[in-house]
Amino acid sequence: MSKSKLGVYVISLGGVDVLEYVRRAMPRVILSMDHNLETWRQVKQLSPNTFLLGRYYLDDGEQIYLDQPELRATQFFNRMKPEMEKMRGVYDAWMGYNETVIHSAVEARRLSRFYAQWGNLMRDANLKSAAYSFATGNPSAGFPNPDGNGSEPNYWQFLADGLRACDYLSLHEYSAPHLQDLQGFLCLRYRHVWNLLPEDARKPLIITECGIDGGVLPGGAMAQKGWTFFTNQDGYLSELQWYDTELRADDYVLGATIFSLNPWGIQGSFAIDRAEKIRDYIAQGGAPPPINPSQPSLEQAVEQTARSVSWMPVNNTAALWQYAKQNGLQDQQTDEIHFTYNGADYIAQVFNLGIVYVKVGDWGNIKVIPK
C-alpha cells in the first residue's frame, strides 16, 4: 500500500504525546499551532520527510487586509518573524490567515494583494508560504445556484496573483454526517478550484483541516460537533479511507491534516489522539517518501525554460513559409523581414537553404536566393 496522504492537526502539545504518535504513524503532513522547537526538531529526527506546516494564531478580528493589503501583509510577516526564525529549518512552510471570508470581487482582489505581498516577503526571507486556508465550501467558485437560476460568483479568478507569489495552496474540507455528502461542493471541492486556476497559479495543495464537522449542516444546531456525534471509530476510519483514496489520485495534493489530534469542540468530539485504528491506518506504508512539491516536474521545468526566452513566430499560412516548404528550403531562421526597395514594399525571410523574398501583393512571383 502506498503511503497515506493523511496527517494530523496539532492545536497544542499539551495533553497529547506527539512524539509517540509520530513514531507510530509517520504521517505525511502535520500542521502545528504550538511552536516548541525541541519537540518538532525531535519529530523531524523521527520522520524526516513528514511535512511540517506552522500556523501563527491570530484572533479573527486581527486578520485585517481590506483597508491596506500590502501594509497588513507586511505587519503580519513582521509579527510572525520571531517564531519563523526560531523554527527555521524545522518547519517546511507557514500558512497565512485562517478561514478568511470574502463577499465580493473587490475583497477577493484585495486578499490576493495581501498574499502577493506576504508571499514575496516570505520568499525574500527564504521561507515557504501557504496561501488562503479558506473554510470548507468557500469562497464562491461559480457553482450553479440552488434555485437553478444562474451561478454564484467565481472569486478564484481574482485570487491567482496571491497564489503566484506563494508556494502552496491551503484549503479546508469538511462534511457531515459523511465526508461524501455534497461531494465536490465540500470535500473534493479542491478539484474544481484546481481547474479554475491558471496553470501558473496552480501550486501544490495542502488540505490544512479536514474531517467530519456538524457545522456544515443547515440550522447551526450541530456546530462544533465532530465525528463522535455521527459515527464510531470504525465508521470514521472508513470515511477517511475514502477521502485518502481520492487524495492519492491527485499528484498535486501534498496531504491533508485531520482536525484534530487534540480534544476540541463539544465534548472534545473532534479528537483522534486515542483513535488507534486511524493512527495505524496512517502508519501503513511506513515512513513517507521524500517530497519536494515546490520543485517542478521535468516537463514543467522544460516548459518554464522555454517560456523564459523569446519564441520565433511561425506563420505557416504565410506565402513565403508555404513557398519555402514546397521547395525544400528546410526550417525558417528568421521571422518575416519587411523592407522597402525603390519605393515598393517587400517581405523577406531566411530559411536554411535560401532567402525567400516577394513584393507585397505579388504573391505569385516569390523568388529565392540560394544560400
Image: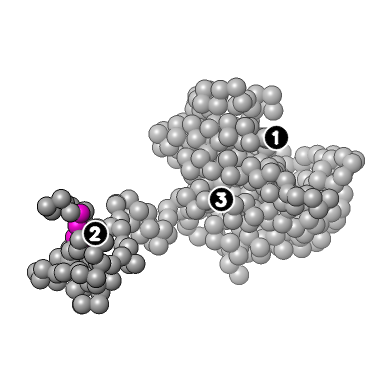
Res 251 quadrant in image: bottom right
Q: Which scheme is used to colour this image of the protein?
A: one colour
- Asked if the residues shown at circle 1 and circle 2 are in contact, with their CB atoms under 8 angstroms apart, the answer is no
Q: Earlier in the sequence, mark 2 or mark 3?
A: 3
Query: Label 3 crowding class (10 Å Cα cut-off): few <14, some 14-19, many 20+?
Result: some
Q: Is residue 195 magenta?
A: no
Residue 346 is inside the magenta segment: yes
Name the residue that disc number 2 marks: 360
Q: Give the magenta-colored segment's residue range.
A: 345-349
Q: Position of residue 229 (x, y in %)?
A: 87, 49
Q: CA distance from mark 1 to mark 2?
A: 56 Å
Residue pointed to by mark 3: 197
Where is 20 relative to 321, above or below?
A: above
Badge 1: few (under 14), some or many (20 or more) residues near its Cα, within 10 Å?
few
In the depicted view, which residue is nearer to us: 307 or 178? 307
Question: To which residue does mark 1 refer?
Answer: 103
Residue 198, horizontal then vertical, whole percent: 52, 51
**Any part of residue 346 in sight:** yes
